[in-house]
Amino acid sequence: MQRNGTATGASSPDIITILGPTACGKTSVATHLAATLSLRQGCDIAAEIISADSRQVFRGMDIGTGKDLADYTVSLNDATGTRHICHIPYHLIDIAQAGTKYSVFEFQRDFLTAYQDIAARCRVPLLCGGTGLYIESVLRAYKLVEVPENPLLRQQLEGKSLAELTAVLATYKRLHNTTDVDTARRAIRAIEIEEYYRANEVDKQHHFPTLRSLTIGLDVPREVRRQRISHRLHHRLEHEGMLDEVRRLLETIPAEALLAYGLEYRFLTLHLLGKLSYADMCRQLEIAIHQFAKRQMTYFRGMERRGTAIHWIDATRPVQDIVDEILTLLPTTWTTFSHE
């Protein structure tokens, strides 16, 4: 099913956003869009990508997060049939040390630095990712502050199950992203943030500009998405060396830190610690990723209800067809982005 939203009206957007659930092909679409813009404008680089992925910020976490850095090199023919190799610059990937924490506040801060740098060079910023709260914090100009730890609250919440913590989180009026809250540690941090916002006046503490976005959602039928997720998981395990990646990380990072990152890093760590057999790891991880993709789509639908217009495109179509449709959504007089 395709749902169309009015993205930008007659005005030119400040940014193009490409979102969607895991395994829908976001990176490939974004890089081909960037390459096509470059060819059409007759320059080496016309667009740069800003990643909106909560785990791709970490160095050394490559296979499990699906960085797919090879996708940032695109081979395309121009109108004359001449082949061009485009190397698309990217931002907010490999910027933090694995084992540390990275918050929405830090993402919004780092996004703005990258956005302003790209805009200053008259290039098109493409925001691409699947972490809904990161994307919404930019598109709805959230006013965020850096939230300190609350030792007393953490002590009170210690020992509660993930289900209990999620129920607590659901009682807060301020929207919080639950897409990535798949461990007790993350849920406690989310509650900590909500309590800080409840107790402090934060609206005037942090300014973020309002950006006009042409927002594209890549829609994949549920069964196709499930097939892609399953195939990709087994390929990463059997051919790409994802287990070896986690082994290397465990040499320098405490297991507790990797467990907190959830999904691939949680289940592979449990297997390497001897707490899950290989078969159980594969089965439970596959289920968890399917559930994660479902939560992502739920979040994106929530974004639409909260006022973000998303133009949904069938992601099973050829990549260049998707890119061509995106280009038709830009104003007819548009030739390059104008940053005011």
Image (cartoon, rainbow, N blue to C red):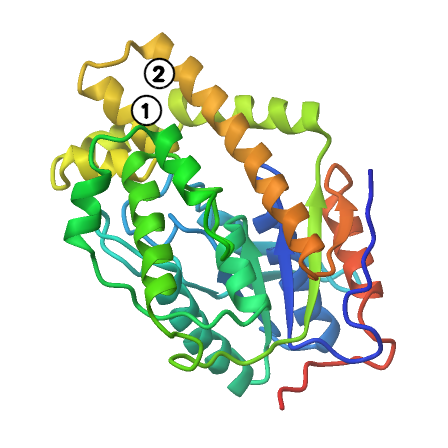
Identify which residue, 72 or 291, lies in the foreground.
Answer: 291
Along the horizontal axis of the image, is 90 left or right of 309?
Answer: left
Disc 1 secondary structure class:
helix
Q: Amino acid at mark 1?
A: Phe
Q: Which residue is mark 2?
A: 281
Query: Label 1 to label 2, Cα distance in Å?
Result: 6 Å
Q: Is residue 253 above or below residue 276?
A: below
Question: The C terminus appears in which quarter of the rendering?
Answer: bottom right
Q: Is residue 94 visible?
A: no
| Residue 2 figure quarter | top right
Provide residue 95's location: percent of width, then percent of height. Answer: 31, 61
Q: How many callouts does the rendering have?
A: 2
Which tag, 1 or 2, sits closer to the chain's start?
Answer: 1
Q: Relative to 73, is 33 on the left or the right?
A: right
User: Could you say which is closer to the camera, residue 145 or residue 48?
Assistant: 145
| Residue at image mark 1 | 267
The kind of secondary structure element at disc 2 is: helix
| Residue lying at 64% horizontally and 49% vertically, measured from the top left | 302
Quadrant of the rendered structure where residue 17 is?
bottom right
Q: Position of residue 83 (x, y in %)?
A: 68, 59
Residue type pointed to by label 2: Met
Above/below status of 161 relative to 15: above
Instruction: Give x and y (percent) for residue 262.
Output: 35, 35
| Disc 1 crowd, CA 10 A, few/some/many (<14, 14-19, 20+) | many
Q: Are marks 1 and 2 in contact (CB under 8 Å)?
A: yes
